[in-house]
Image: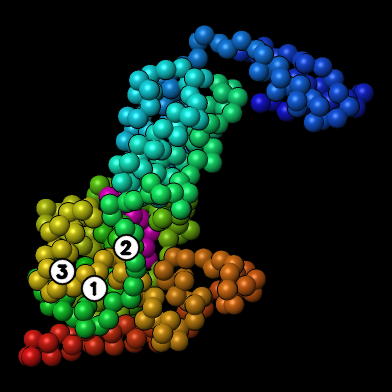
Amino acid sequence: MRQPVKCPRTGMWLARYTAPDGSVLQAGRFERKRDAQAAIAEALRRAPRSASAPLLVDFFNEWPQRFPRHPRTQQTNQERITRYILPYLPRKGRFPITELRRASLRHVQAQLLKSGLAKETIDGAFSSLSAMLRDAVDDELLDGNPAHGIRVRPNDPRLSPTRTPRARRAVPASEVGAFMRALPPKHRAVCWTPFLSGARPGELFALARADLDRQRQMIFVHQTVNRYGKLEPGLKSTHHVRERERRGRWTLIPACLLRMIDAYPADIEGRLYPSPRGYYWSQRNFYRNVWEPAQRASGTDFTLYDARHTFSSRLLAAGIPLVEVAAWMGHSLRAGGEQLNTTTRKYAHATGELTNQALQELESFVAMADGAAERRADA
């Protein structure tokens, strides 16, 4: 809805609005802005609907071209709407976008809850739909966004996900040692890396030899492999940053991990951890072919993200300041708690002076895990 315009000559608020045929009309002049807004809303309510409103599914297909976003964001939005929204709408979205009602969206939400999906999945689908409808409002195809604010209440009795959220944890050295012992030697370096660098799974498979700084025992992380095994520039929150130096971060690579890496021939494309066929690993294939067989053989149960949590937990327990650990993990300090206040959020910066202490702690963790595995094998 267009907002009233204040006349510079009279000081009155002009209740201007856009009619369905595209012409700009005026519903009167008012002393108070709120009265002008009410007049615009009433005029739009009484205005005849355009018969040429596009179908919802047609607007959805044109949406990426009309309102460009980062390719990764567009892909996520399209997948969510295609999978979770359109199949449950009347005629699968083949109706004028102006006929979309909140009641229809509540029906979609009910169907998704009935199918046993998690709250995060359902809310994410409606967030993507809301983004699309917000752009339709901006294009003056809709007066309001019917998907705005649709969320599953945490206490909704219909909420019964078939898979409960996984609780993250720091993995003890004994479990890590048993897991590593069950791995083929050629996969131990890639599986140790998230424990010793804090790399996210997508960052792990994008690491390159050219980004290693062996003298400092560090590596520059600046790109990501998506879940389909495709390389993308940038990290979780820096895909939009063009400058390579600004979209990445330095993190730790202890000497023991460098020795594991050097024990195997370098990839011709410079990848640190290529797949057996010489491509980038997709997370699904890596879990199926490498991670899960070692879990079953060792009787352990943790994920690549648990390894990242272990990295931060070990360093914080060793007395490494929070600001240093956050920098290696690619986090910013936010408000909340005693440690996270204005000083730490705005004025605390990593100095790198405790890098050697952190590297020693990670080397000790590897030694503890190897020792625990040996004792377990002897027993």
Q: Above or below — where is 374 with respect to 267?
A: below
What colour scheme was applied to this rendering of the protein?
rainbow
Q: Which residues are magenta?
A: 218-227
Q: Secondary structure at mark 2?
A: loop
- Look at label 1 and name its amino acid: Trp
CA gap between label 3 and label 2 equals 16 Å
Q: Is residue 342 left or right of residue 218?
A: right
Furthest residue in direction right, as rendered: 10
For the point 34% across and 86% down, the residue is: 361
Q: Is residue 56 left or right of residue 29?
A: left
For the point 48% across and 24% down, the residue is: 100
Q: Which residue is mark 3?
A: 295
Q: Nearer the viewer, residue 270 or 365?
A: 365
Q: Nearer the viewer, residue 65 or 38?
A: 38
Q: Is residue 296 left or right of residue 63?
A: left
- Look at label 2 and name its amino acid: Arg
Assign the C terminus to one quadrant of the image.
bottom left
Q: Secondary structure at mark 3?
A: helix
CA gap between label 3 and label 1 equals 14 Å
Q: Which residue is mark 2?
A: 166
The image shows residue 322 at horizontal and vertical percentages of 49, 77
Residue 269 visible in the picture: no
Q: Which mark is residue 268?
A: none
Q: Which residue is mark 1?
A: 192
